[in-house]
DNA sequence: TAATTTGGTAAATAATATTTATCAATTTTT
DNA sequence: AAAAATTGATAAATATTATTTACCAAATTA
């Protein structure tokens, strides 16, 4: 019996924490290594002991956020029956995440997709995992007859993610408030039944 | 009789052109001032004569692209009757833009939204203009009874933009091909009638 | 207890962005 | 038509930021 929990050294934790704190108020690009080191209370060199560069640190912060998100999603889906009900839940949970975890929303919606390294990061692997979960639910829905079989699953997934993300953009960028329940209700209704009268 | 065309000096044009060319292959962040100056065949200092910094140059390139896009959109909408028909056309035109103008797609989808200055740029003013055009069409559709009046127009707009953008992300990022006609047909069908059977 | 690893610092160096001084060619003013 | 001012551009200096290196003390392992 042996746990595989690797305890992180305090300096590393302080660096990760500083990054999170700074991203609350400022854009990734505007943060200097010196800013991060100062906020963390460590020397600049230490950052390079634990991370390849500033971006690698960003990806690490995103990975931690996404880990929590996926745990919550798995839990949220427990005991839910039917593809459409699962979809409803996923829409609600995703909006809730973006609305209540602004740093998470900003990183994933605004900060990472512009670099090649992101697509080789652990964080992106988690994003793909979530993608697969959603795609499987969509396929389940098509198989069960709940979802139309004339639309390619990948497009349905793009519509769901795209609509959610775009609806949370103003929250991420301008800090505009989002009512999770209202947004989830409207977006679900819109995606399920369309905009045509 | 006097035209207000301000002719740009050759150096400025070369700089803008170099930026466009470099963005074809590389991410904005990876471009140095020295890269841009070398590709343009000018000295680094000249870039600061015409642009505040690298990002200002990026916004200028986007503005030029968006100018063309808006001209095309206005032309595409000429003579089209009915809100849903206009929506169909806008969906098709937007996808066509993203699919056939990859630098444009990459700038707007991946590179600009992470900086505060973007939201004060001329380029963003054009984006908002397009937003208003779409919103007006949606309101027209609601008024005419073509579009359901139970969904807030802003959410409908977010769904349209979000779905289009997400569906073009892989094209922008990984250079995956997009069939404009297929994508437009599927996305239109999905948004108009929903995913539920 | 000697050797090694770990967590960390401080300072040097490298890469990049930005500013400044300068200049020749053109345009405007008188 | 000459003097003054502006324009388009350069080259080099400077400032900022990222990154590497050499080193050290405490803790752990052999």
Image: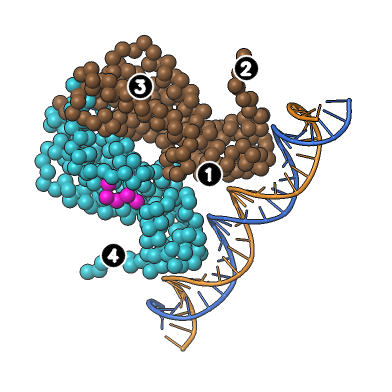
Chain colours: A cyan, B brown, C orange, D blue
Q: Nearer the viewer, mark 4 or mark 2?
A: 2
* Part of the protein shown in magenta: A99-103
Tell me which secondary structure the magenta stretch mostly adopts: helix
Mark 4 belongs to chain? A
Q: Is residue A112 above or below residue A187?
A: below
User: To which residue does mark 2 refer?
Assistant: B2
Identify the residue shown where x is 31% and y is 44%: A176
Determine if the magenta segment contains residue B160.
Answer: no
Badge number at residue B90: 3
Marks 2/1 same chain: yes
Dot 4: what SS?
loop
Dot 1: what SS?
loop
Q: Is residue B54 above or below residue A147?
A: below
Nearer-N-terminus badge (1/3): 1
A177 left or right of B174 in image: left
Badge number at residue A4: 4
Residue B69: x percent and y percent?
45, 24
Identify the residue shown where x is 20% and y is 40%: A182
Identify the residue shown where x is 13% and y is 30%: A146
Q: Residues within 10 Å of mark 1 (few under 14, many from 20)?
A: few
Q: Is residue A116 visible?
A: no
Residue C24: x percent and y percent?
81, 35
Q: Nearer the viewer, mark 4 or mark 1?
A: 1
Residue B171: x percent and y percent?
40, 31
Label 4 – label 1 distance at C-alpha: 38 Å
């Amino acid at each position: 019996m042996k746990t595989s929990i690797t305890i992180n050294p305090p300096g590393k934790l302080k660096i990760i924490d500083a990054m999170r704190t700074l991203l609350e108020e400022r854009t990734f690009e505007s943060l200097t290594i010196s800013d991060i080191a100062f906020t963390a209370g460590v020397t600049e060199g230490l950052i390079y002991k634990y991370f390849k560069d500033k971006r690698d640190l960003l990806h690490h912060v995103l990975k931690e956020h996404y880990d929590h998100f996926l745990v919550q999603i798995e839990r949220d889906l427990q005991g839910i029956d039917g593809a459409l009900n699962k979809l409803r839940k996923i829409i609600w949970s995703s909006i809730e995440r973006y609305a209540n975890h602004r740093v998470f929303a900003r990183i994933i919606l605004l900060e990472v997709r512009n670099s090649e390294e992101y697509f080789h990061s652990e964080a992106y692997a988690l994003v793909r995992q979530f993608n697969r979960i959603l795609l499987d639910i969509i396929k389940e829905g098509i198989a069960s007859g709940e979802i139309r079989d004339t639309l390619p699953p990948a497009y349905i997934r793009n519509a769901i993610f795209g609509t959610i993300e775009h609806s949370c953009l103003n929250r991420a960028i301008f800090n505009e408030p989002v009512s999770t329940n209202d947004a989830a209700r409207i977006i679900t209704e819109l995606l399920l039944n369309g905009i045509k009268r």
